[in-house]
Amino acid sequence: MTVPVVPVVSVALQPVVSWPREAAPGGRYLITVDLRLRDDQAAWPYPAEEYAVGFMLSGRSHLTVSTLGDASVVLHRFGGTYGPARFVVAVDGAADEGLHTALWLTLISAGGVPFHTAKLPVTLTRNAPVRPAAVGVPPAPKAVPEMELPKLAGTGSDAWSMAAIVVAGRPLLALATDDGTLRLWQLDASPPTELRIGKGPARLVPLPTTDGRTLLAAASGDTLALIDPATGSTVNWMRRKGSETITALTALARPDGSTWVAVGTSHGSVDLADTSRASFQNLRIAGHRGPVFTMTSVDSRDAILLASAGADSTLRIWDPEHASLLHELVSHTAQINDITTVRDERDRLLIASASDDGSVRIWDPVTGALATAVTGLDQWINAVTEVPPRPRQPPLLVWGGRDGTLWWSDRLTNSYSVEGGDRRAVTALTSFDWTGRSILAIARAGGHVELRDATAMTAKERKPARPNSTGADFDATADAIIVIPGFMGSELADAKSGNTLWGLSDARWYVSAWTTGASIRALKLTDEERTGRTGRVLATRLLRTPAFAPVLTGIEPYTGLVSSLRRVCRHPDAVLEFAYDWRLSVAHNARELAEAAEQHLRRWRHHRQGSAEARLVLVAHSLGGLIARYYTGVLGGRADTRLTIGIGVPYLGTIAAVEALQRPRPLPARRMAELVRTLPGMYDLLPFYRCVYDERELRRLTADDMARIGADPDLTNEAIATNRHLASVDAGPTRGVVGVGQPTAQSLALQAESLVSQRFLPTPDDEGILQPVDHQGDGTVPRFSALPPGEDALSPTYVAQTAGGLPRDHNVLAYLNAILTARPMGPPL
Amino acid sequence: VSAPLGPGIDAPDVITVGEPFMIGILNETDPGSTRCSIVDAATGLAVAMPSLRRNSEGTTAAATLREPGLYRIQVTTGSAGPVERLLLAVRDA
């Protein structure tokens, strides 16, 4: 097959612009834009004697542009125009003096194609000259008003994986197609080279080598092959053992300069392949709950990160060197088809993910934060790519949908341009540089590939109906939500050094900390802190990785809970993560919550997606539920709170707190006791229902009981006072999520100098005789203790789950979303 | 006798590497479909899938972990999602 190359006609232009390089706030300025030929001796390439060029002038912050007359000029073959286009720019009167802003000028061909953009810097100053002088702007590159690119014929098989590389100075487009074939296309030569890789859909990724070449890693079925694109020959190949097929791959640079290939499989595994040894051995690092569809690597400032996504709708960020999961990002509600890296305005590498949920989301792979999202696209999004920064142009993010629609956005915001639809599905996208131009390659169903010149593509300010919303077509809650974690559920750091004291991502820290005790000592409450002079330790954020403490077992991260809640809000800003120093008392942290809640509600009511009618919904776990109750019932927060949802909250306390405070026992429980005996937050979890079996009667726990096991009687008495207070307050509507089915200590028996926990509660039978009854619970909180007390308590929900597992249980997340999106419907139709 | 309130896990919170330990599985709603696995909490990668033993006392699984670290026990039975509990493995508990 011959690929025709059409000669391109071109002429070089020089824009001449008069604009105010210094402008006064509140001022208005005339701007003129004209054109001349850079070389007036050059041959005129067009059949007509005149050629119209349009201008688009837009203002950055504090500048508003309006057009005077026709925003175009007509260029004559003899080098001049019939007069400039004119614009007026108005400067915001409230803009700060000294601010550096800019105008952006875009030149548009007669055919409507943007072909050059120039930045016109403007500084705001009170002493701006009244009339600016005419100044030439940087010349345009050799303009190509009507661009022609080769037409590539279809392959007949869908290409879901595509990349462009340079071979012998020329671009080469590589497509991996569903028939297990790798097709290599020299864009200015023909025909394509076809290489059969294996059985099943093929995938590919460029693979830089230490000798400066670029190979292609291509996979199909269980086979991974390394191809030299210069010769079309196979350099190396390996076969993966087992029944899984390779469904995604990416290249992974390693600290020693070598490059590995990371592969994702049909069963959800993510493996590393050492291509130099042609081996998959011992390199398996992690898994998804379903096939992996897409992978990429990110060179962050500190490490090479690996990202993978697929059918389970999660985007996972890994540290491949330590084989650890850094983030499991669960904002998408349907499978993720493609991910790619993209740079923001500060040149940070982010990850864009495209999903069947009709959204493209941008993530910070280092923090796991959702940076922005384009949602409500009403289309399955198959592919996404970044067109790298072009001269004086920001990066362009392009994505394509299953109905053939193409979108592009140049500021990573929820405004974009859109084109097409009713065409063949976009299956893959990639971009590359060709003779100084940025070319976008679009693969469509059937193996059709088209090339677009993206050098001057810019996004117009087209916003969806609900800009920056979650794009939900359900009735998203207008309320402000606060997530209040449980005991040990916030990361803590030393205020002076910034060192993390609790919540480290490395699981080995917990092994060392609870056996040697060295790292735990810094968490003990000092005498100063006990007298109220806090500030030595700062709560930085909610737990991001699993943590562990003996007796209380594990504390799971809250990332999934927060992401899930943000999906049913009008805007992610509606959700506040309230991190607190869990070592301190419920009363102390409730006062901190009151301050944070007041600020959050005020901000949300003034937010562009917020509502003046918004109230608070408190979603609290474990100890966080007691803090929420103190805030609503004691500190008056009830007035601003629509609902509190308590997940595994020990409203009546937990026997586990007594177990944690017991006299010295074997390690590592002894370390736990040494730590928590100093912490008021632990005492506030003590059980205050009739739980002590003494002299054939049930009575309440006393300070003397606690002194007997080595605990602090003063802290016990303070906790008793707090608990009595909480039992009698009117805390407003509260729903409980109650964990059941787990063996749970429910009562205590006095034995010599210890309190022995029992997995039952002596409960009177019909004749009033105490009989052991196992109510079970979540493993930490007995079932009856997790029921919110008071008249405003609403029907609880029961889930078979442990205390730590409740905040990440899918049934719990679904229940919370249902509560938050429920609306009164009136009588049935 | 416990009420059948859904699957439950009865296991130690800290274990010694190299030494077998028992996991009790409570309230099986569909014994034929019960699965128990232990995954590395950092990676989500399964490190053990102990086989289940049933007798008159109930269902148990015996497992041994080779490396110190933080692990997650996951039990599924019937159509219920996994019940999960964290577990610390140390050299000498």
Image (cartoon, coloured by chain):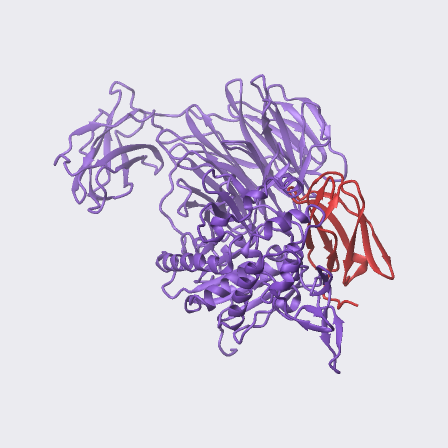
Chain colours: A purple, B red
Residue A77 occupies which quadrant of the picture?
top left
Q: Nearer the viewer, residue A812 or A718?
A: A718
Quadrant including the N terminus of chain A: top right
Residue A281 on image: x %, y %: 73, 30
Snapshot quadrant of residue A76: top left
In the displayed structure, A183 sits above or below A509; it is above
A679 relative position to B51: left or right: left
Q: Nearer the viewer, residue A434 or A1?
A: A434
Q: Is residue A422 visible?
A: no
Horizontal side of residue A289 vs A342, given as left or right: right
- Residue occupying the far right of the picture: B55
Q: Position of residue A220 (x, y in %)?
A: 68, 34
Q: Position of residue A167 (x, y in %)?
A: 54, 20
Residue at x-position 59% and y-position 21%? A209
Q: Is residue A70 left or right of residue A412?
A: left
Instruction: Looking at the picture, tell me which residue is in the foreground, A265 or A271.
Output: A271
Count of labels in the image: 0
Q: Report the residue that reaches farthest toward the left.
A: A130
Question: Which quadrant of the figure has residue A158?
Answer: top right
- Note whether A75 is above or below A742 in the view shown: above
Can I make out residue A623 in this image? yes
Which x, y percent locates residue A543? 55, 48
